[in-house]
Image: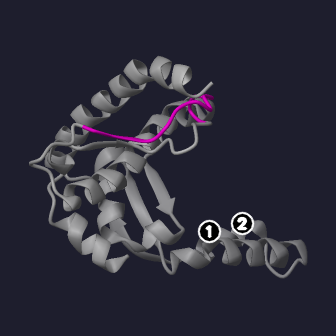
Amino acid sequence: FKYLDQIAARVPAGANGVLYTPWIWGERAPVEDKTLRAGLYNLSLHNSREDIIRAFLEGIALNTRWLMQPVKKFLNTDVRQINIVGGGAQSDVWCQIFVDVMGVTIQQVEEPVYANARGAAWIAAAGLNQIAFTDIPSLVKFKRSYSPDPKNQTVYSQRYEQFIQVYKAMKSVYHKMNT
């Protein structure tokens, strides 16, 4: 994965025009549509494997931005900061892509692949009255904080609109192909 990070870092924001939609087996949120499928768009002979790798990372971040609309509505507030965990959170490149696409600050949790196990242990400790639930936020340690790059945000705002346009244009095609 570190090698893929190095490759993706060499490609500018916007993946030299390549757009990836990550709906490998449909989508559940923010739309319920089992017929959607993943796709690479605007791929040409001028693009490289590096562009495709960057587009994959960007496409997942764009889909996450799309999902944030109903999350904000549900919370009835803007989301200004996200703590990122899991395997992808080990990638500095991907964290920066998420920040630039979503326009929020991201806190990279230390050893993010163990976040679920730590969380389960803290909940168990609280259940056993060893700690209070209110103690848990102070136990979370962060490796790094990421802030949006305004130059990349401009590129990703345009890319997000194109991402939504691709969904709208392709949903009926996917429905015909996959029902």
Q: Taking 146 as reference, is 161 above or below it?
A: above
Q: Where on the picture, by quarter, is residue 9?
A: bottom left
- Residue 167 forms part of the magenta stretch: no
Number of the label disc, if any, that sits on residue 137: 1
Judge the density around disc 2: few (<14), some (14-19), many (≥20) Cα neighbours within 10 Å.
Answer: few
Amino acid type, label 1:
Pro
In this figure, which residue is indicated by the disc labeled 2?
Answer: 134
Q: How is the image coloured?
A: one colour
The residue nearer to you, when weighing 133 against 64, is 64
Q: Is residue 112 visible in the rendered structure shown here?
A: yes
Residue found 33% across the figure and 79% down from its top: 2
Q: Is residue 103 visible in the rendered structure shown here?
A: no
Q: Taking 20 as reference, is 105 above or below it?
A: below
The residue nearer to you, when weighing 47 against 128, is 47
Residue found 45% across the figure and 68% down from its top: 89
Extreme-right residue of the structure: 128
What is the secondary structure assignment of the residue under circle 2?
helix
Q: Taking 1 as reference, is 44 above or below it?
A: above
The span picked out in magenta is 29-41
